[in-house]
Image (cartoon, rainbow, N blue to C red):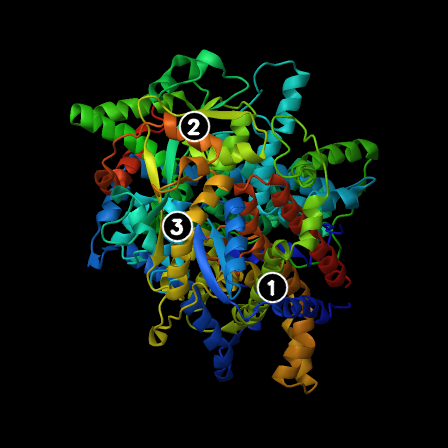
Amino acid sequence: MRTARPRTLAVPALLALLAACGGGDGRQVLTVYSPHGRDMLKAFEAAYERANPGVDLQFVDMGSQEILDRLRSEKANPQADVWFGAPAYTFAQGAADSLLERFVPTWATAVPAEARDPAGYWHGTYLTPEVIAYNSKRVTGAQVPADWDDVLDPRWKGKVLIRDPMASGTMRTIFGMAVLRSLRQTGDTAQGWRWLRRLDGQTKEYVLNPTLLYQKLAREEGLVTLWDLPDLEELRSHTDLPIAYVLPRSGTPVLVDAIGVVKGAQHPELARAFVEWAGSAPQVTAAARTSFRLPARTDVPDSALPEPLRRAKQALKAEPMDWRRFEKESPGWMRYWDTNVRGRR
Amino acid sequence: MSTSIDRPSAGPASTEVAAEGRADGRVDAEGAGRRGDWWVIAPVLLILLWLVLYPNLFVLLASVTERGHATLEAWRRFFGSPAELGALWASVWISAASVVLSALIGVPLAFLFARRDFPGRRLLGGLAAMPVLLPPLVGTISFLFLYGETGFLTRGVQTVLGMTEAPWRLAGPWAVLLVHAYTMYVYFYLFAAAGLSRLDGGYAEAAAALGAGWWTTLRRVTLPMLGPALGGASLLVFMTSMASFSAPYVFGGGFRVLTTQIYASKLNGEEGLVAVEAVVLAVTSLLFLAGLRRIEGSREYTGASKGLGPAPRTQARRGWVLTAVAALFTGFLLLPHLTVLLVSFVPEGTWTTQILPPVYSASGYRALFTDPERLVPVLNSLRMATAATLANVAFAFAAGYLLARRRFRGKGAVAALVALPWALPGTVLAVALATTFSVHRPLAGRFVWVGTFAILPIAYFIRNVPLVTNAALASFRQLDPALEEAAAALGAGRFTALRRVVLPLVLPGLAAGALLAWVTALGEFVASILLYTHRTRPLSVEMLSDLRAYDFGGAAVYGVLLIVLVAAAFALGYRRVGEG
């Protein structure tokens, strides 16, 4: 009986050794956690590294809720320098868990007071209006749902797709809006839960991630969904998927998308410089042009914005949201929804 | 592909875990702990306690504390919630059903390929093991493209039958079960095939001579003799189903299992509940392990070998019928692989509503070699999987030697610790590691590994401890201790005997285990996603990032690369190892 020679194992070992060589070009590494998507981040990386040749900008691409979760688990040994992108209330949770470092950039005053943290832990860069999206090949003219309640029309029963709301800031916000509206109008949450129950009854499927949501909507597995404006505009600009959207008539939550320095960052200086740069007027304008991010700054003239954003700004009616209450109660509401609303038709 | 199934030295060796607790039948082979053994026992114990047990204690602790105070609140919430209890029950029954269904596919398939001979048997037999090469994330996505509502097969059937609606919806518990059976039957197939090839044909002949029909022979002789192999496969399938996340998450619809509950609680920031759910999941898996061992321990079917080979394959009279059946079945099993291959040629953003992609190009593959950023994750995964596997081999050799050859106090505990990582889903392990190794307290054995290169290989290492160790253990068990005695009698020192006699003989089994471990680590996703950094991002995470950017083609290129790497490793490994 011949047996295997130890050399069998030497092959992978050699491979490993080879692979271990290389890497490390002497630049300072700036690590940024961001959900803004690869296309926008690649453009940012190129622009920033051109302006700062000594810095290697590294984006870690993940969902905003996942970033919060990640920062919590890395609290004792922070790996990120900057947290770039998430709804303001997520940042507020991060600040409450002392995951953020106070830093007030010079552009803070260009942002309206409600789009920045009074304590200076986070500042808004973009505004994200939530919208109703639909398959533009199958849904046309008067059929297009113009407001939130239209989505509950019997016509859309079994045709609504919803992104998994536990993992999505956008969906949490829209669900939160339903509950907050109910509180505002009736003093308690019952009406909101009724609305969400009816929405659940319309829903065909809760979808794993945005990409699959677009795919399923384009392939007519469902015809209507709820999503946000910048992502849909960006999608429309680089694919020809038959997807369009409307801004709900009765008003829609406008999320403040923020940026902040991570507490205990390994390169606090660089982190602050990056925040300063990302929120600067030219960079905010660039993000609007290439990735359809609506600037939070009030000093960017409409003429500098691309056509869809200009149109959206006119049609937009912001929903008055009690963000403080939302921030505090949203986890409880989502837990209640997951246990008592979802699939209980 | 030479993953031919008739080589007993390969893969399935790991069945032995279930048999670990039983009386060995060769007790005389186990030397009582010699005084010189501490240098093996100590490091093995240290690694098990420190890396396997210790981090999980923090999870246990987190389940009974909140902000530093002791409280049973999270436990009360778990047991007071019908949704949570429903998820627990769903996890258990889905796993049990997965075992049954996987066995129903895998075992007959093994009999077909091990007992019948027909044209193309070797090739088809190898191909039937292919699903083991499909990394979880790749598998799930390709299922969606294939059997989802607008998938190739679904649309195809719909068109052929002239239906207006999709003929089925891949959602709910049945979809989860289907995906599990599809991907996990391989364990039964490989284990049963290896068991059959080890089986002394003399028993079946004896049974036949005594007048037993084929059914009686199967029921009373063959299947019981396959007991350990089937037990091992059941264990593996049950554990894998319990820990399975992608399938219920993607295909479950509103169907809740423990792993999806853990994810939801985690995103909701409810750390206490996450810990409770994790502990419940681990305890359930361990109870299954204990139950299986009890059953195994009470039945003993080993017989002395008469030196006969396995029962010869019967030349089927209408061989081509079997070939056709096997080819059809194998083709069906390979559809997900073909799907990944097809999608890998789709340029970003071109494939929208068409049944088949309208544009094909090799740009995804070219980018792999022209854009250094695309290659980084490949190198990362190769590097980390290799480092972890080398550590696994060293550990498994020592631990296997101890468990098979030595008697010492606490041996049962060591065996249980070796099996523990199986009972823990990747998410739980990742959380445990992130908690334990994020602070610098050397005296408490805690170092800052989070965010460093080390953390992922360590996670891979821990996850694969049971796999490789049990492969090594099986080899040690098959090794006649007389060989070592002979070496000793001929004047070889212990070390020389180990190096010149034991190691070469154990190596094939060890290498087979290492191969499976390497493959698992290469495509690992669940723990990686929680622990990676930009610099250490592995293949699976980059694949997800492609999916997020609507680049199905880019993700599929990585998928194909993974399948090819793994297939190449298998082909190389089996050729080398199987040369004996």
Placement of B316 over or under B439, stated as above or below? above
Quarter occupied by the C terminus of chain B: bottom right
- Please state if A252 lies on the left or on the right of B100 as rendered: left
User: Going 43% across and 28% down the picture, which residue do you hit?
Assistant: A311
Residue A296 showing in the rendered view: yes
In three-dimensional space, the C-alpha distance between marks 1 and 3, rounded to whole angstroms, equals 38 Å
Q: Are marks 1 and 3 in contact (CB under 8 Å)?
A: no
Q: Are the numbered discs 2 and 1 placed on the same chain, yes or no?
A: no
The residue closer to the viewer here, B426 or B423, is B426
User: Where does residue A234 sit, x and y in percent of width and height?
Assistant: 51, 36
Q: What is the chain letter for disc 1?
A: B
In the rendered structure, which amino acid carries the disc numbered 3?
Answer: Gly
- Residue A279 tag number: 3
Q: Quadrant of residue A253?
A: top left
User: Going 22% across and 48% down the picture, which residue do you hit?
Assistant: B73
The residue closer to the viewer here, B568 or B310, is B568
Residue located beneath label 1 in the image? B383
- Residue A164 tag number: none
Residue located beneath label 2 in the image? A311
In the rendered structure, which amino acid carries the disc numbered 1?
Answer: Arg
SS at mark 2? helix
The residue closer to the viewer here, B539 or B107, is B539
Q: What is the chain letter for disc 2?
A: A
Circle nearer the viewer, 1 or 3:
3
- Please state if A44 lies on the left or on the right of B443 as rendered: right
Placement of B83 over or under B484, stated as above or below? above
SS at mark 1? helix
User: Where does residue B103 sit, x and y in percent of width and height?
Assistant: 58, 40
